[in-house]
Amino acid sequence: MKHLLSIADISRLDAIKILDTAEELAKVSDTPMKKLPTLRGRTIVNLFAEDSTRTRISFEAAAKRLSADVINFSSKGSSLSKGESLKDTAQTLQAMGADAVIIRHGASGAPARLADCQWMSGAVINAGDGTHEHPSQALLDAFTIRRHLGQGREDLTGLRVGIVGDVLHSRVARSNVLLLTKLGAHVTLIAPPTLLPVGVESWPVSVSYDFDSVLESLDVVMMLRVQLERMQELFFPNAREYSRYFGLNSARLRTLHSDAIVMHPGPMNRGLEITADSADSARSVILEQVSNGVSVRMAILYLLLAGDTSIEAGN
Ligand code: NCD
């Protein structure tokens, strides 16, 4: 595999290989040195045309732990989605000698266009494109779930994951649905009908409009951020109504079974989709998601750039 554009492109075995590699690389992060020489002399460009904190610094930390040189290029408002400037951007990256480009962009499909163009030869890694996909987030989420609830299994067979909230605007939800079901989990989307995408019936998931009725059955509660910046119209009556029906609070936490975990990709709207006490509770693995993100992104860079050809797209 040359690029990581979408979870749809990778097989179950590819995914397991990334998770297993991340597990090995996590051991490096636990040593005082924290560094491997693997990508010494390689140049990795972080091209972020949309806001990001965690994902950008996580990829940067991952690249540096593998000894790569990192160039941060945060061009908010860049017009990468327009034909001419894509060419300019790609030619600039090529001239910088980029071995890999990690791209976040507001337009769905921008990373695929960069990967397909003939002006740049490096690997392209999708760090979130519009409402389409966020593959590295899904991989770090799967890694975190497997660590907590996998019981030594290589995949997530039989686990029940609820993805709650603004599915409509969420690339995290799309990548997670693809990956978690590939790994054998049963996924339930829990949201008001207005925040579910058209065509959700064809997704390999169950759908519920009633959070309380499914809570007890869940092993993982994955809360999504309400993406107010992507909402040009009204999707729910008001914030209080939203929290009452779809927010995670201490009463709902008490209903969960004793091993269940709470996740959120961040950034959180505390008080809207999740209360502060739920976010900070003993069930919350939200900060572990952040630290696991570095190991998983190291694994992605390692497998794409260190010449391992056994991760193949397809099948
Ligand atoms: C997510 C994103 O940007 O898609 N955040 C992240 O990468 N940690 C989710 C979000 O913004 O809600």
Image (cartoon, helix red, strand yellow):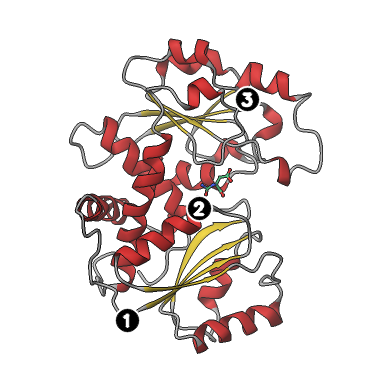
Where residue 134 is drawn, which disc sits there? 2
Which of 159 and 38 lies nearest the eye of the viewer? 38
Extreme residue in the bottom direction: 95
Residue where numbered disc 3 is placed? 271
- 9, above or below 204, in the image: below
Position of residue 277 measured from the top left corner of the image (x, y, whole percent): 50, 20
Q: Residue 41 carries which label?
A: 1
Circles 3, 2 touching at the beta carbon (< 8 Å): no
Q: Who's the residue at 72% across and 19% down the image?
A: 240
Q: Mark 3 and mark 2: span between their CA atoms?
A: 25 Å
> Residue 8 occupies which quadrant of the picture?
bottom left
Dot 2: within a 10 Å radius of its alpha carbon, few (fewer than 14), some, or many (20 or more) residues?
many
Q: Does the residue labelled 2 lie within 8 Å of ligand 1?
A: yes
Number of other residues with Cα within 10 Å of mark 1, as a class: few under 14, some 14 to 19, many 20 or more? few
Give the residue type at disc 1.
Gly
**Where is 67 relative to 197, above or below?**
below
Q: Is mark 1 on a helix, strand or loop?
A: loop
Mark 1: is the Cβ under 8 angstroms from ligand 1? Answer: no
Q: Under tag 2, what secondary structure?
A: loop
